[in-house]
Image (spheres, rainbow, N blue to C red):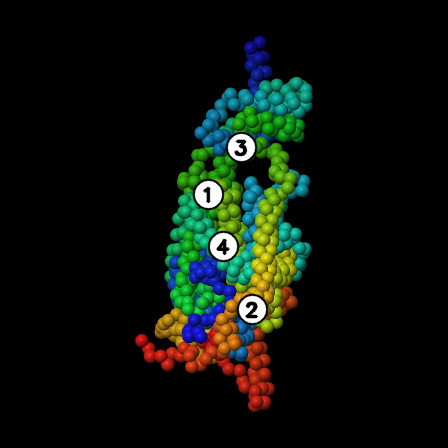
């Protein structure tokens, strides 16, 4: 008979082919589009190098402890998020359901962002790039008006890609090209997640490593571009005064939190496929450090390219002014160069001030151009695409850039889909005879059909809504209850013993303090600050309206009440499961306690879960 | 005789000066950016180039109106600057001291813009006629949009991958089913030796449903630690 009950029995649960696959999947899940287009922006607006201080403090006291907690939990209980939290305590089952709900909501809109990336990718094969020039208007006398007044890149993004309406209430029609790309994206996600981690484990080798290759290529190329040093200096020059603003600390905390993809349930799902004898402490530290290093590494090429773009814009501005001056005063060509521009301007201003004033020269300010900071889709699809047109060999750079964005997003999608898929597999309602391929197919088709609403003309406004409300507040709430649940319901002593059984050593004082006090406190503060800031400013959005007087500036509009109701619903829906499930079990228990013959369910421990 | 000649010449000169001056009626300003267009191969703008310009304009007028009355001397240039910009008018040789209407000149230049540009190795942007707009060339549009082709390729690859994986999965499942039914058949026939312990096959004991003998199960406290 078997003597060793330490070694777990074969329970038919799929497992990773090797440790490297698991680590790569976690890193791929954590490293996503936000590392490329949110972190550099935050660094820029919050005082450059000084932002790293609150960032690393948040990493140390919030990111790493929560990450370790989730990885240890999944590894110990070997179940997806819903069943895992049910196992810890039936009252905490709502936490699992909440994180499942968030994973569903995020999967819906995240893949639509990938749709946009795919659309740009397949358009990058044209020569010249379609966003480099404005199309002509109907009677071929000039350029298209909307394009002429804004820029060609703006026109391609807002008109040719999104075909956006001026208001969130005007839904417009479904854009067929986006539907095709959406179908392709979901087909790719299905292809990679068709058998759960069996297939994502193979796909992750490509999607997690490829972005680093491309980032390195962009780094080398970006540093050779003129103006790169200005961009980098601008990014990293520390301005310690910004640390006095609490907004900076809040942004650092939320950035770390959302960047590590905590509270989605995906990390629990990933680590549940591990063998229990795995050092989850080292894994957590590795994943968190790699994620932060990637953010820093990505900001270097991004800012080199942005510096290049600002410098080129500055030179263009100077050149245009020089041409107007030369034409007005009939001076010989190349008499005024960029270097002696200021000397000439002062000379001409003193001799012919009225003529100079009549020219209406634009003031060219490099600092102002560098200050134009954009994050999110604006960075990738407007600013960066404009910079790519200026580079020689723009098709190749565009293709590389969009494949990189696609891989980054795809590896995060794997985590989201696993967060949806794994708990469903373990629920009793899904019969065991349904093959995994069918279940993942059903999930992908349902998500595709629901995500069709994001391909409407007003789709991008809805994605902003989902991003701001569904993927922010609920995660904070769920993470808070996660930490409280493990620290005070399951009790840290028992959890430390479980971790010791898995890693071979007891979690040291740092973990004890952060799990018990610092992380919950920090999460509470962040949550309160976040809600306060949200409530203070009225919820508005920036609409692209060609008929607006201030066009090409965006028009600030307020959300109508029914849209606000949806926003609140998105934010509250995942959170409401936490008290609901607890209440449900409380009622069940009080009913059961009236019948003394029934035994109340025991709260299981980690070791007990395996037997 | 000489005096009459001088008088006529001066009258003509004054008339010319009146006809060709900045912002005169039917006069056009031309601006060249030779250094921008040609860089190191730029030529200097001198009287010969001016002569060529006059010839090109006369050529354009001849082609447009298809009557060979316009001479090079009909084209007057004035106010040449270092920028290389100047004004020009086209006089009408049939009517004395008048200029050809601006619309005609504009139409003639427009018709022959290409020829004029290539004579000077310049383009619409670098040889500017300030009041004459050039027709914009339509963008090159391939018959099938390129993105559809790329999209088709990507989609075919993905569908092929999905079909392959699904078929492989179905085949694997069939093989597993066949194996397990074969095994059951063999067990019924008793051809496979299964180790049996007290009437219970050993494999069953490995499952969780089996009973673990508490006496022999590993119990940390019963063994002396090393």
Up-down: is B32 above or below A458? Answer: above
Name the subunit of mark 2.
B
Q: Which residue is mark 3?
A: B126
The answer to whether marks 1 and 4 sit on the same chain is yes
Q: As drawn, is A176 to the left or to the right of A351?
A: right
Q: Which residue is mark 1?
A: A315
Q: CA–CA distance between discs 1 and 4?
A: 38 Å
Q: How many numbered discs?
A: 4
Give the SS element for disc 4: helix
Mark 1, Cα crowd under 10 Å, few <14 / some 14-19 / many 20+, is some
The answer to whether marks 3 and 2 sit on the same chain is yes
Up-down: is A524 above or below A352? Answer: below
Q: Kindly identify the residue that appears in the image at 36 percent across and 72 percent down.
A: A505
The answer to whether marks 4 and 3 sit on the same chain is no
Q: Kindly identify the residue that appears in the image at 56 percent across and 72 percent down.
A: A97
User: Which numbered circle lies on residue A155?
Assistant: none
Q: Which residue is mark 2?
A: B190
Q: Kindly identify the residue that appears in the image at 50 percent across and 32 percent down.
A: B37
Q: Are marks 4 and 3 in contact (CB under 8 Å)?
A: no
Q: Kindly identify the residue that appears in the image at 63 percent across and 60 percent down.
A: A445
Q: Which residue is mark 4?
A: A207
Q: Quadrant of residue A239?
A: bottom left
């Amino acid at each position: 008979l078997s003597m060793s009950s330490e070694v777990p029995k074969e329970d038919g649960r799929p497992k990773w082919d090797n440790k490297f696959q698991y680590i790569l999947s976690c890193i791929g899940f954590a490293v996503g589009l936000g590392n490329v287009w949110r972190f550099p922006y935050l660094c820029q607006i919050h005082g450059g190098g000084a932002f790293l201080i609150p960032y690393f403090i948040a990493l140390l006291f919030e990111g790493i402890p929560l990450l370790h907690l989730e990885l240890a939990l999944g590894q110990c209980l070997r179940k997806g998020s819903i069943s895992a939290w049910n196992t810890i305590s039936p009252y905490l089952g709502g936490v699992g359901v909440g994180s499942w709900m968030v994973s569903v909501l995020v999967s819906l809109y995240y893949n639509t962002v990938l749709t946009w990336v795919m659309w740009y990718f397949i358009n990058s094969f044209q020569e010249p790039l379609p966003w480099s020039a404005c199309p002509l208007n109907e009677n071929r006398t000039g350029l298209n008006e909307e394009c002429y007044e804004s820029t060609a890149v703006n026109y391609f993004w807002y008109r040719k890609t999104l075909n956006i309406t001026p208001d969130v209430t005007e839904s417009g029609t479904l854009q067929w090209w986006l539907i095709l790309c959406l179908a392709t994206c979901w087909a790719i996600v299905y292809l990679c997640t068709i058998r759960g981690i069996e297939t994502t484990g193979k796909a992750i080798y490509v999607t997690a490593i490829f972005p680093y290759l491309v980032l390195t290529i962009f780094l080398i190329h970006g540093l050779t571009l003129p103006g790169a040093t200005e961009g980098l200096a601008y990014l990293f020059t520390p301005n310690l005064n910004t640390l006095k603003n609490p907004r900076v600390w809040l942004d650092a905390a939320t950035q770390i939190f959302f960047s590590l993809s905590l509270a989605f349930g995906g990390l629990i799902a990933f680590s549940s496929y591990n063998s229990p004898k795995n050092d989850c402490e080292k894994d957590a530290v590795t994943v968190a450090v790699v994620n932060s290093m990637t953010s820093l590494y990505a900001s270097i090429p991004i800012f080199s390219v942005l510096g290049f773009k600002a410098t080129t814009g500055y030179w263009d501005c100077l050149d245009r002014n020089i041409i107007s001056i030369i034409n007005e005063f009939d001076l010989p060509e190349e008499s005024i160069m960029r270097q002696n521009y200021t000397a000439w301007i002062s000379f001409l201003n003193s001799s012919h001030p009225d003529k100079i004033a009549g020219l209406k020269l634009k003031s060219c300010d490099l600092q102002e151009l560098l200050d134009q900071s954009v994050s999110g889709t604006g960075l990738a699809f407007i600013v960066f695409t404009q910079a790519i047109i200026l580079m020689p060999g723009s098709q190749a750079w565009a293709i590389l850039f969009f494949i990189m964005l696609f891989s980054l997003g795809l590896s995060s999608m794997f985590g989201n889909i696993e967060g949806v898929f794994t708990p469903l597999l373990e629920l009793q309602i899904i019969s065991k005879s349904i093959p995994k391929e069918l279940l993942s197919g059903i999930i992908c088709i349902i998500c595709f059909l629901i995500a069709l609403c994001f391909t409407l003309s007003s789709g991008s406004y809805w994605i902003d809504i989902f991003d701001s409300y569904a993927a922010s507040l609920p995660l904070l709430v769920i993470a808070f209850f996660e930490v409280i649940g493990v620290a005070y319901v399951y009790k840290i002593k028992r959890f430390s013993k479980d971790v010791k059984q898995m890693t071979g050593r007891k979690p040291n004082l740092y973990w004890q303090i952060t799990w018990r006090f610092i992380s919950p406190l920090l999460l509470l503060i962040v949550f309160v600050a976040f809600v306060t800031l949200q409530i203070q400013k009225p919820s508005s959005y920036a609409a692209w309206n060609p008929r607006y007087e201030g066009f090409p500036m965006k028009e600030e509009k307020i959300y109508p009440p029914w849209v606000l109701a949806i926003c609140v619903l998105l934010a509250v829906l995942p959170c409401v499961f936490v008290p609901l499930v607890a209440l449900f079990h409380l009622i069940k228990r009080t009913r059961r306690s009236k019948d003394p013959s029934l035994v109340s369910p025991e709260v299981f421990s980690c070791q007990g879960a395996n037997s | 005789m000489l005096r009459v000649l001088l008088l006529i010449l001066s009258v003509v000169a004054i008339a010319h000066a009146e006809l060709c001056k900045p912002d005169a009626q039917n006069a056009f300003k031309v601006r060249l950016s030779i250094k921008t267009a040609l860089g190191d191969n730029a030529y200097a703008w001198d009287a010969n180039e001016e002569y060529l310009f006059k010839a090109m304009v006369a050529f354009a007028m001849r082609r447009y109106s298809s009557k060979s009355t316009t001479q090079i001397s009909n084209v007057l240039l004035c106010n040449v600057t270092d920028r290389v910009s100047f004004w020009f008018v086209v006089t009408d040789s049939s009517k004395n001291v008048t200029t050809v209407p601006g619309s005609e000149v504009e139409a003639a230049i427009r018709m022959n813009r290409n020829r004029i540009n290539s004579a000077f190795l310049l383009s619409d942007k670098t040889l500017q006629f300030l009041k004459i707009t050039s027709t914009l060339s339509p963008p090159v549009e391939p018959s099938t949009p390129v993105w559809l082709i790329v999209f088709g390729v990507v989609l075919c690859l993905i569908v092929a991958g999905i079909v392959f994986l699904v078929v492989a999965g179905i085949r694997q499942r069939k093989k597993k089913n066949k194996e397990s039914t074969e095994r059951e058949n063999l067990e019924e026939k008793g051809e496979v030796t299964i180790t049996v312990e007290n009437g219970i096959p050993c494999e069953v004991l490995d499952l969780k449903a089996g009973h673990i003998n508490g006496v022999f199960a590993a119990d940390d406290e019963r063994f002396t630690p090393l």
